[in-house]
Amino acid sequence: MKKINLIIFETDVNRFSVAYLLFILEKEKFAGNFNLHFFKTPADIRALLENQAILNGPCVFMFSFMSSLLCEVIENIAEIKNGFKLSGMNKNCVLIAGGAHVTGDPDSGVKMGFDLIFKGEAERSWPDFLRLAVEMPGESCFREKVLSGFASAIVKDERPVPLDLYLPFGDIYSLVPPLEIMRGCFYNCRFCQTATCEVKYRSLSSIEEFFAEYRRRQFKRLCFICPSAFHYSAEKPSKIKADTIEWMLETAREKYGIKYIEYGIFPSEARPETISDETAGIIKKYCSNKRVSIGAQSGDGGRIARLGRGHGLDAVHNACETLKRHGLTAVVDFIFGFPEETQEEQLTTLAAIKDIHTRYGSRIQTHFFLPLPGTPLYSSRFSPLGPKAENLLKKYSSGGICTDWYLEGIEQSKRICKILDSFQS
């Protein structure tokens, strides 16, 4: 059979996932069976479908995405379907989806028009799919033959996935993503998808293997993916293993000579109650970042409790003060527009934002609520900003007290909620 065209949706938002999936493809020795193509927009798809080699061969359109990309995904699927009508290539094409959105709401993936939806962790189901696609006899009716290998459009794999299974290295894709050392979360915040996966860790031996390969490839900047930076290796949330984290960072710097190390900053963050003199001191001693990301989410104590955060506003103040004493700056996230959020709550949060920024010089990042699939608040919708809160946010953002990211968040939430509502009609 000819090589299969693997046509991949790739953006700045999902490129870490794309890299990891391609490294798995390479590790499982399937790279020679696929021609790789990438697209971001409908215009890219039109250009690809003008390529006769693609039209004549079997194709897999692959999407890995979170809810924030929903609008772009739907636009691209419409263009792909239109291309099928014009070219008659539907029998040779399969549309597959994975990632956070369809993991939380696989039925929406079916409604969007995907042939297969990979729910949950894909470290085992993805190579299974690749193997099946490669082993299909002949080139005709590729779609029918591939789909006949699955009992349902929704593919759910219950096999356990240790994080040590793969390292994010390869040669067919230039980007090396941050090293994921923790997946899942001990807490179950009502707006967040992270806790929908069980807590698991990459082993220290696997991490050290990554450091060695990192040095061999002469990479300079080391970053980590860890939902709660100081819970790495913890057996329960109250038992932080700071010595293990220190050993990991010290090993990277001293044994492997990696000098630019970022920890506790995006794409990771640290829960406020885990910031102490000890943990702040570790960042100060071994890391290059002078900022540490922490989530407050609201300045209203009642709202924080209803969200299931597991800490209060005092913990946020303590974290910001501790970081400041160690010469570090807290980057504090706040979200507006939670369901049933009152105007009084919004003003309380704004007062907290001003207070935290004034006292500690913290950077305040403002966001707007987006319902995420698989969470208790998925079926809920945002509360609009009240006029007083809106005016204060404009004043604070123009005055450097906080970012104006909430503005983009409002428009994004409107667009995506409209799509989510259409799935129910």
Image: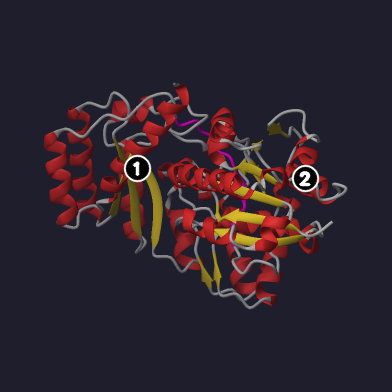
Q: Earlier in the sequence, mark 2 or mark 1?
A: 2
Residue at 47% over, 58% down: 43
Q: Residue furthest top?
A: 425
- The reply to whether callout 2 and callout 1 are in contact (CB within 8 Å) is no
Where does the N terminus fall, quadrant-wise? bottom right
Amino acid type, residue under disc 1 in the picture:
Gln
**Residue 394 coordinates in the image, percent (x, y):** 15, 48
Could you say which is closer to the camera, residue 35 or residue 97? 35
Where does the C terminus fall, quadrant-wise? top left
Question: Can residue 238 be seen by looking at this rendering?
Answer: no
Residue at 32% over, 26% down: 339
Could you say which is closer to the camera, residue 274 or residue 19? 19
Would you say residue 3 sits in the magenta stretch?
A: no
Mark 2 vs mark 1, foreground winner is: 2
Q: Residues within 10 Å of mark 1 (few under 14, many from 20)?
A: some
Q: Is residue 212 left or right of residue 302?
A: right
The dot on residue 412 is 1
Q: Which residues are magenta?
A: 177-189
Q: How is the image coloured?
A: secondary structure
- Disc 2 target residue: 142
Q: Quadrant of residue 385?
A: top left
Q: Secondary structure at mark 2?
A: helix
Task: Check the image and report above or below for 179 versus 175.
Answer: above
Task: Check the image and report above or below for 286 versus 199.
Answer: below
Residue at 32% over, 58% down: 324
Whole-number angstrom distance, CA of label 2 to CA of label 1? 37 Å
Amino acid type, residue under disc 2 in the picture:
Phe
Question: Can residue 115 be seen by looking at this rendering?
Answer: yes
Could you say which is closer to the camera, residue 407 or residue 365? 407
Task: Check the image and report above or below for 203 versus 313.
Answer: below
Could you say which is closer to the camera, residue 359 or residue 388? 388
**Residue 20 coordinates in the image, percent (x, y):** 65, 56
